[in-house]
Amino acid sequence: MIEIAFAMGSKAEEAQGASQQWVGLLPLLLLGLIFYFLLIRPQQKRQKQHRIFLESLKKGDEVVTAGGLCGKISGITDNYVTLEISDKVRVKVLKSTIIDRMKGE
């Protein structure tokens, strides 16, 4: 009779232990959701906007690079852009380093 009581008690303890495991994982899941919505998702949106911006560039646009060069696009390929930074002074830069269009002054 005592063996049956111990057997019944262990199943109840196992069920309680399984529920405690889920409760232990809950903070990790919550932390994962916070990281996704505050860090990962906004970064993906910025990357998508920058990719669309780079695809919309055309010859004659005045742009600024991440290094601070300002110039007019005189040539464009898949990976590189040729900027005219002064009369007859052209520089070849990576397309991905272009961060913004220059606003009219």
Image (tube, rainbow, N blue to C red):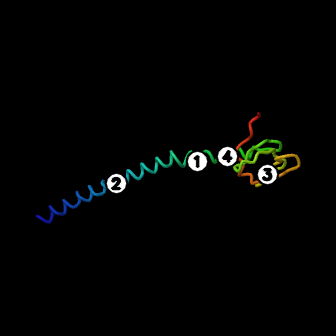
Q: Which one is earlier in the sequence, the residue at label 2 or at label 4?
A: 2
Position of the N terminus, as image quadrant, is bottom left
Left or right: residue 18 compared with residue 83: left
Q: Which residue is mark 4?
A: 50
Percent across and percent down for residue 31 are: 43, 50
Q: Which residue is mark 1?
A: 43
Q: Amino acid at mark 1?
A: Gln
Q: Which residue is mark 2?
A: 24
Q: Which one is earlier in the sequence, the residue at label 3 or at label 1?
A: 1
Q: Which one is earlier in the sequence, the residue at label 4 or at label 1?
A: 1
From the image, state whether disc 2 or disc 4 is nearer to you: 4
Left or right: residue 54 compared with residue 33: right
Percent across and percent down for residue 82 are: 81, 51
Write the residue at 74% across / 51% down: 95
Q: Amino acid at mark 3?
A: Val
Q: Amino acid at mark 4?
A: His
Q: Cα distance, mark 2 to mark 3?
A: 52 Å
Q: Cα distance, mark 3 to mark 4?
A: 15 Å
Left or right: residue 84 compared with residue 39: right
Q: Which residue is the extreme one toward the right?
A: 88
* Front residue (pair 50, 2): 50
From the image, state whether disc 3 or disc 4 is nearer to you: 3
Q: Cα distance, mark 4 to mark 1?
A: 11 Å
From the image, state whether disc 3 or disc 1 is nearer to you: 3
Q: Amino acid at mark 2?
A: Gly
Q: Secondary structure at mark 1?
A: helix
Write the residue at 37% across / 51% down: 26
Q: Which residue is mark 3?
A: 81
From the image, state whether disc 2 or disc 1 is nearer to you: 1
Q: Cα distance, mark 2 to mark 4?
A: 39 Å
